[in-house]
Image (cartoon, grey):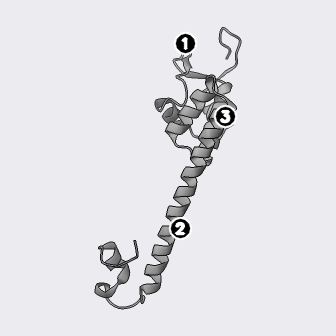
Amino acid sequence: MRDSAQTTTLTIGKIARSAGVGVETIRFYEREKLLPEPARDPSSGYRRYTESTISRLQFIARAKELGFTLRETRELLDLRAGSATCGTLRSRAEEKLDDIRRRIQDLRRIEQALLTLSEACPGAGGLEACPILAALEGGFGDAG
C-alpha cells in the first residue's frame, strides 16, 4: 500500500519480521514513546508503518545490546533527531561506560562474596550450620 506521499507503508507483522522483533515489542515501544504512533489505514484501521521504522527498531535493539535503558535510548533518539553533536553522543557513551564499569565492580564483589560463602559451606549437615543461610540471614561477617 502507498500513502499520499508515495511512501511504502508496511503492516506491523512485516515490520516485526524485517526488524527481527515481535509484534508485542513494537506495541510496547509505541507505548514507551520509542516509536511514533503510526498512521492508520482509513479503510481497515490497521497501523501502517514506514520503512524508516525498521532502522529505528534496529537502533533501539543496538542501544539495548550496549546496555542503554529505555529512558536512555529515548534520549539518544531525541538527540539523533535534534541538533546534538558527536561530542554530546560521545559524552553519553562515556557515561554509560562508567556505569557499566561500576556494575562490573559490583558483580566482582558479589562473585567474591559468593565464592567465600560457597567455600565456607561444608556441603553436608543440617541447615542450622549452613554459612550461606547464616549470611543471608545477616550473620556471616564479611560475606556481603
Residue 94: name its quadrant: top right
The residue furthest top is 4
On the rendered structure, is 17 left or right of 143? right
In this rendering, the answer to whether 16 lies above or below 119 is above
Kindly identify the amino acid type of the residue bearing the numbered disc 1: Ser
Asked whether the residues under the numbered discs 3 and 1 touch, taking CB atoms below 8 Å apart as contact, a structural biologist would say: no
Residue 26: name its quadrant: top right
Front-most of 44 and 74?
74
Residue 63: name its quadrant: top right
Q: Which residue is mark 3?
A: 87
Image x and y of residue 65, in percent: 62, 48
Which residue shows up at 61% across the image and 23% down it?
82
On the rendered structure, is 42 left or right of 53? left
Q: Which residue is mark 2?
A: 108
Question: Which mark is drawn over residue 80?
Answer: none
Q: Which residue is mark 1?
A: 43
Residue at mark 3 to residue at mark 1: CA–CA distance:
46 Å
Residue at mark 3 to residue at mark 2: CA–CA distance:
31 Å
Front-most of 104 and 137?
104
Kindly identify the amino acid type of the residue bearing the numbered disc 2: Arg
In this rendering, the answer to whether 140 lies above or below 74 is below
For mark 3, give the secondary structure: helix
Which residue shows up at 58% across the image and 46% down it?
96
Image x and y of residue 30, in percent: 51, 30
Image x and y of residue 17, in percent: 65, 37
On the rendered structure, is 139 left or right of 49? left
Asked whether the residues under the numbered discs 1 and 2 touch, taking CB atoms below 8 Å apart as contact, a structural biologist would say: no
Kindly report which numbered mark, 3 or 2, lies closer to the viewer in this rendering: 3
Kindly report which numbered mark, 3 or 1, lies closer to the viewer in this rendering: 3
Image x and y of residue 131, in percent: 36, 82
